[in-house]
């Protein structure tokens, strides 16, 4: 099924997992505060949750898992916390890359790399190159990512194509925009989960989420378990996705 966003959605039968699950991993700081620990401890525990949920997603048959790791707005946080988050990305790739590759996981990082340190860029490129041909699960990590920035960048690229005479403005359609997004080639998320009880998207996959089902979990991200993931998928399966049409009952 192709939607107005230009991406391909799954036609999974009832009882089948969503092809693409995206998660806003929220609550690391509150998890640490509840235990009178520094925020860095919450972020470290959050990485452990990532490891567990990536494995669980593969076991559930999910094809694409997108995790919101660091937003373009997170630079406003104290420098010490930002440095901790950068360090955790380094640690995750260095420690888990071999296992992810062995398990058939393809890694893809979306977001602006221009302001990242050179060693982080090198790690990202190494991970993407090593796992490029893997097919079991595509793990998309949104790092230094913001939905508004992504759409603005896509529009800028399209404008340049028009300026150079390689594109006719009358031919621009939603599918055109989708091709210029960071997620080009990745189906729109069927299900978006946000942890910690907050109920907003926070500039995450703004274009791609047009018809996504949303599930909000009260669990803080470090406490988000495979069982909670299964519960979210079960909630998704109970819903009827109409994509702007009518249900079979005519409602």
Image (cartoon, rainbow, N blue to C red):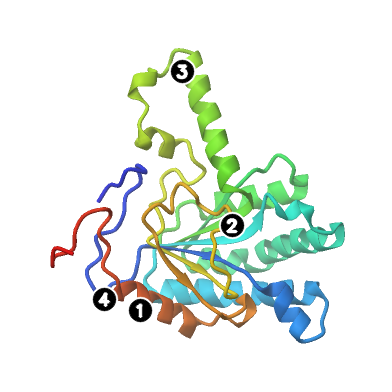
Q: Nearer the viewer, residue 1 or 53?
A: 1
The secondary element bearing badge 2 is classed as loop
Q: Position of residue 5 (x, y in %)?
A: 37, 43
Task: Please tell me the numbered disc located at residue 15.
Answer: 4
The secondary element bearing badge 3 is classed as helix
The span from disc 4 to disc 2 (Cα, nearest Å) is 30 Å
Mark before the other along the chain sequence, 4 or 1: 4
User: Where is mark 3, residue-wise?
Assistant: 162
Task: Please tell me the numbered disc located at residue 234.
Answer: 1
Q: Nearer the viewer, residue 134 or 111?
A: 111
The mark lying in front, picked from 4 and 1, is: 1
Q: Nearer the viewer, residue 195 or 42?
A: 195
Which class describes the residues within 10 Å of circle 1: few (<14), some (14-19), or many (20+)?
Answer: some
Mark before the other along the chain sequence, 2 or 3: 3
Looking at the image, residue 110 sits to the left or right of residue 20; the answer is right
The secondary element bearing badge 1 is classed as helix
The secondary element bearing badge 4 is classed as loop
Q: Is residue 125 above or below residue 165?
A: below
Q: Quadrant of residue 46?
A: bottom right
Mark before the other along the chain sequence, 1 or 2: 2
Mark before the other along the chain sequence, 4 or 3: 4
Q: Are marks 4 and 1 in contact (CB under 8 Å)?
A: no
Task: Please tell me the numbered disc located at residue 202.
Answer: 2
The span from disc 1 to disc 2 (Cα, nearest Å) is 24 Å
The span from disc 4 to disc 3 (Cα, nearest Å) is 45 Å
């Amino acid at each position: 099924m192709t939607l107005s966003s230009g991406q391909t959605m799954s036609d999974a039968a009832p009882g089948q997992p969503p092809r693409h699950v995206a998660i806003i991993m929220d609550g690391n700081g509150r998890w640490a505060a509840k235990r009178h620990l520094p925020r860095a401890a919450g972020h470290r525990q959050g990485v452990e949750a990532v490891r567990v949920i990536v494995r669980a997603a593969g076991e559930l048959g999910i094809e694409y898992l997108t995790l919101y790791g660091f937003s373009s707005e997170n630079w406003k946080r104290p420098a010490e916390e930002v440095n901790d988050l950068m360090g955790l990305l380094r640690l995750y790739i260095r420690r888990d890359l071999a296992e992810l590759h062995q398990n058939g996981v393809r890694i893809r990082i979306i977001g602006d790399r221009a302001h990242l340190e050179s060693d982080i860029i090198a790690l990202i490129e190494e991970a993407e190159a090593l796992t490029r041909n893997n097919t079991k699960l595509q793990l998309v990590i949104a790092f230094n990512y913001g939905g508004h920035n992504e759409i603005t960048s896509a529009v800028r690229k399209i404008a340049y194509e028009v300026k150079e005479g390689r594109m006719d403005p009358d031919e621009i359609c939603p599918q055109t925009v989708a091709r210029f997004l960071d997620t080009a080639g990745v189906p729109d998320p069927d299900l978006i989960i946000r942890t910690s009880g907050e109920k907003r998207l926070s500039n995450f996959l703004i274009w791609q989420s047009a018809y996504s089902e949303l599930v909000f979990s009260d669990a803080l991200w470090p406490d988000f378990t495979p069982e909670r993931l299964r519960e979210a998928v079960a909630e998704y399966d109970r819903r009827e996705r109409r994509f702007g049409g009518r249900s079979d009952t005519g409602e």
